[in-house]
Amino acid sequence: MASAAVRIPDPRHVQMPLQFISGGPQIFVHEGARQALERRFELAFPGPVQLAVTDNRQRMITQTRERGILRVRVHMMFLDAPERVQEALVSYVVSGAREASQVVGAFIEGNSHRIRASVVVRGPLRTKGKAHDLSDILYRVNETYFGGAITDVLITWGRRTRMQTAPRHTIKLGSYSVQERLIRIHPVLDKPWVPRYFLSYVVYHELVHHVVPPVRIGGQSVLHPPEFLKREREFKMYDRAIAWEERYISRLLRG
């Protein structure tokens, strides 16, 4: 994830030669970054400060004050936050400033993809299909477009459905579950005639959902906001992938 704090990848996603104790996700924290943020709190608070960095999935900031000591727990995303955000974080914790709260809230909302999954994926993941290996495609797309920074997103082929008795008019080729941090790819794409670059595009599209969450515009949740559409077109073969889908969508609908 961030250079200042790194989450240990899910072993089902990345095979690591190192052994870690059980007990859920763990993080490595850059102690220099933690001390620098702790120093900001010390300069603003008239007393000792103890700062801890967490990988909490629900509470991004907590604080207690006892016997003149301020104990703060913040999510790992704040360690490499912009200076303006860190200043707002300190102001919010120390004095409860309203404007600072808004800055911090906006930062958390924009970095929701850095919060670990709230639902544990149950059951085995199916990544190797008859024609395509999703784990390899996910790895290549992650390295090419995200610098390998996405370490907690899993992928699997979706369940095969029974033979359609009536013609299908729509098909969802891929989906992303933010609660599970899981991409599901429709098994209809596991065919030799489906080009790898198109599967890569579908996986890339779902990864963009991971880093660009929905936004509220005019009181409605927009799944593909302008930032999403901009990022989506950064796929190197975007036009080619869209053209291929338009040409072969009827064949995909037939399964």
Image (spheres, rainbow, N blue to C red):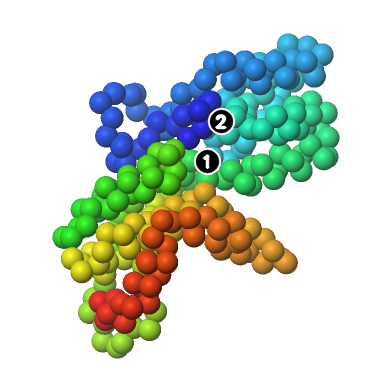
Few, some or many residues within 10 Å of mark 2 (<14, 14–19, 20+): many
Answer whether labels 2 and 1 touch (C-beta < 8 Å).
yes
Residue located 33% across and 24% down the image: 20
Q: Nearer the viewer, residue 205 or 105?
A: 205
Q: Position of residue 218 (x, y in %)?
A: 73, 67
SS of the residue under disc 2: helix
Which quadrant holds the C terminus? bottom left
Identify the residue shown where x is 44% and y is 52%: 207
66 above or below 143?
A: above
N-terminal label among 2 and 1: 2
Amino acid carrying label 1: it is Arg
Residue 11 visible in image: yes
- Residue positioned 34% across, 57% down in the render: 200
Q: Which residue is mark 1?
A: 114
Q: Which residue occupies the extreme left position in the image?
A: 130
Residue type at numbered disc 2: Met
- Residue drawn where x is 28% and y is 30% of the image: 16
Q: Secondary structure at mark 1?
A: helix
Give the left or right position of residue 51, taking residue 197 as reference. right
Q: Is residue 110 left or right of residue 145?
A: right
Report if residue 125 is visible in the image.
Answer: no
- Residue 155 percent location from the top left of the image: 33, 51
Residue 37, compared with residue 1, is above or below; it is above
**Which residue carries the number 2 mark?**
76
Mark 2 and mark 1: span between their CA atoms? 9 Å
The image quadrant of residue 131 is bottom left
Q: Position of residue 138 (x, y in %)?
A: 33, 49
